[in-house]
Image (tube, rainbow, N blue to C red):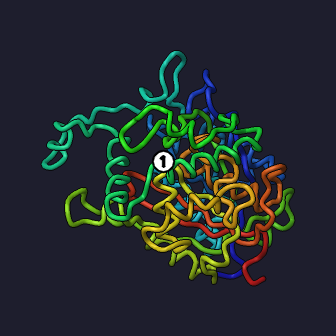
Amino acid sequence: MGEGAAIAGLGMTELGKVYGRSPRRLAADAVRLAAADAGLTLDDLDGLLVSHGLGGSPGIELADTLGLRDLRLLSQMNAFGATAGAMVSYAAMSVASGAATTVACVFSDAPLQPKQSAGSAYHRDAPEWYGFGGMTAALGFRSVNAFYALAAQRHMARYGTTSEQLGAIAVGTREWASRNPLAQMREPITLADHQASRWVAEPLHLLDCCLVSNGAIAVIVTSAGRARDLAQPAVHVWGWGQGHPGHRKERGSEFGLVTGAAASGPVAMKMAGVTPADVDVCQLYDCYTYTVLVSLEDYGFCAKGEGGAFAASGALGPGGSLPTNTGGGQLSGYYMWGMTPLSEAVIQARGQGGERQAARNDVILVSGNGGILDHHSTLIVSPHPKEA
């Protein structure tokens, strides 16, 4: 793999209730910001990987919008929330192989509309239902919320996990967000606030569920050697992995109990030459509090069934033994699919977290999750070259 790859640029548009710009325009802005952040021009890019949100835009036409020419790598990718990690891994492999030298990876979405609720932005009726899917639809399981609630219920029934333990994740994440000027939700909350928030789909309260945001985030991946000479501290990519378990949502399966992190985590850590005990900071995909809990177990930070107690111990919040989602995550920061944890990992690795900067940042784990715990990506990044 030679000297390896590194993230050299990070571009973030305004995030949240940002109106008046299409996903393609937002994506173009993010790529321009990422290139400028690295001290590069658009002419330096010879690769572009694009991930779209709900609306299916942008696609590879983004290259034309940016005026990019003579690209050696161009593709649109989609593994839902696992896409950001997958894009970085493909960009890193392209750089290591010589297929490309400087690759922009971007995600953009704009589901929010003025005077429209966040929930309605993600409401989609499937045009067709097949087999077991038709039965679940008839029973009212038409939303992502309902299926994540089902997953959480399975864990509760099997291991005794409680709503209060999920609430501890929400409270700790909001405490991190209170230190992040970019976070959408910065007002502190208590466990009582979590318990008093309305049900979305039992056992998930409103404060167990992520935000909805408009915006775009891009990163620039290049060789580690080149990154050292650019404008920002290099964020070295040590390892990566994917896991797509394909669990059926039926009795006897491991749906809701084991995720793709159980496969992608060991692969990424082995490549990086680390173990869970070496990880200083976690940036975990937190579409729901439950996603954090089960991911922690599957990565090996605690035993299966002990995620609730681990979260309730205060380990994840400021001052805890495993700082997690230090920017407020998707629960309280901003919801940019897998780019939310990745962007905060870059900020932490650079030591640019300000009030929320973790005390140690040598090894940072980044997770992405897509579907109903169907797809997973893992990255291990560090401010240090891999051989160090």
Residue labelled with disc 1: 288
Image quarter of residue 54: top left
Position of the N terminus by quadrant: bottom right
Q: Position of residue 310 (x, y in %)?
A: 56, 64
Q: Residue furthest front?
A: 192
Report if residue 31 is visible in the image. no
Comparing 315 with 50, the one in front is: 315
Q: Residue drawn at (18%, 41%), measured in percent from left and top?
A: 129
Residue 4 visible in the shown view: yes
- Eyeballing the image, is 256 above or below 14? below
Say if 331 sits above or below 321 in the image. Answer: above
Q: Which quadrant is the C terminus positioned in?
A: bottom right
- Toward the viewer: 223 or 265? 265
Three-letter amino acid code of the residue under disc 1: Tyr
375 or 190, which lies in front? 190
Left or right, 296 with reference to 139: right
Residue 183 appears left or right of 119: right
Residue 18 in picture, x, y percent from top left: 63, 26
Residue at left offset 53%, top offset 72%: 302
Q: Residue 178 at x, y = what percent? A: 73, 41
Task: Please give the name of the residue rendered at 34% of the width and 32% of the height, measured from the top-left corner.
Answer: 124
Question: Who's the residue at 63% across and 79% down the image?
Answer: 272
| Helix, strand or loop status at disc 1 | loop
> Measured from the top left, where is residue 39 in percent x and y?
84, 52
Count up the numbered dots. Answer: 1
